[in-house]
Amino acid sequence: MGSSVQRLAGVGFALVAGPALVLLLGPGDGVTLSNCAACAISAIGLAGSRRQVRLARMLPLIGAAACTVPVGAWTAARVPAPALLVGIGLLVSAAALLVLRGVRASGLRGVRGALAAGAVSGFMNSAAGVGGPAVSLYAVNAGWSAREFVPNAQVYGVAVNLFSLAAKGAPHLAVPVWSATAAGIVLGAGVGRLLAERVAERRARTVVLALALAGGLATLGKGLRGL
């Protein structure tokens, strides 16, 4: 499902898949597997749009994320699992609502806005597996078009997820889980490609955020029960 919405809307893999993977595998392996899969699906998307990437515009975001990813990894390693589930659920739910509302803020423009968005995104990506919303909010406030945003979001997704994996290492999962993940990415990308020809971008974005909000609230509920 995450791969489908990523192919359909250009973003949204981690928002949709992250909470579900956390519920299935726990906050440690769930977030790290989300980082692995998000890196892969971003690389696939980048392969077809690399000529549209404006790397100079992304460097402040990527540099700021590199500084805060270790902080997110350190936090995730030391917070008890139920509390981490609550934190992930709150972050995902809040991020989905903020992007859905298209929050406007003068502080999210220019180099200062890029640094702030990258710093928040790096922390959230490493700790909760969802670094995209902060970058989406920055793009909205910076006035980026969808054509500008999507290829640059892919290169950012590859970078921030590689940083997260370098900080935490790969998840310790059985071969069947890795195989199922790879099959899901390939199948979802194919389904998303077919749907992209039939579903309007705005409707696809709403579906992505609704799924993300549902997953965030479910994760929050499980964490609260654990506490």
Image (cartoon, rainbow, N blue to C red):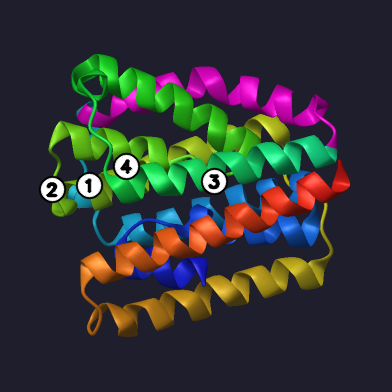
Q: Is residue 115 above or below residue 43?
A: above
Whether pointer 1 and pointer 4 mark residues with C-beta atoms closer than 8 Å, the reply is yes
Image spot of residue 154 (x, y percent):
35, 49
Image spot of residue 189 (x, y percent):
43, 74
Q: Secondary structure at mark 1?
A: helix
The numbered mark at residue 92 is 3
Q: Amino acid at mark 1?
A: Phe
Q: Which residue does the numbered mark 2 point to in the structure image?
A: 145
Residue nearest the observer in this picture, 140 or 182: 140
Q: Amino acid at mark 3?
A: Val
Q: Secondary structure at mark 4?
A: helix
What residue appears at the point 23 percent right and 32 percent down from the top-left corner? 104
Q: Earlier in the sequence, mark 2 or mark 4?
A: 4
Res 130 visible: no
The numbered mark at residue 149 is 1
> Residue 79 lies in what quarter of the image?
top right
Q: Earlier in the sequence, mark 3 or mark 4?
A: 3
Whether pointer 1 and pointer 3 mark residues with C-beta atoms closer than 8 Å, the reply is no
Image spot of residue 102 (x, y percent):
26, 43
**Start and end of the magenta stretch?**
57-80
Give the overall secondary structure of the magenta segment.
helix
Q: Earlier in the sequence, mark 1 or mark 4?
A: 4
Q: Amino acid at mark 4?
A: Ser
Of all residues shown, which one is farthest toward the top? 112
Residue nearest the observer in this picture, 81 or 49: 81
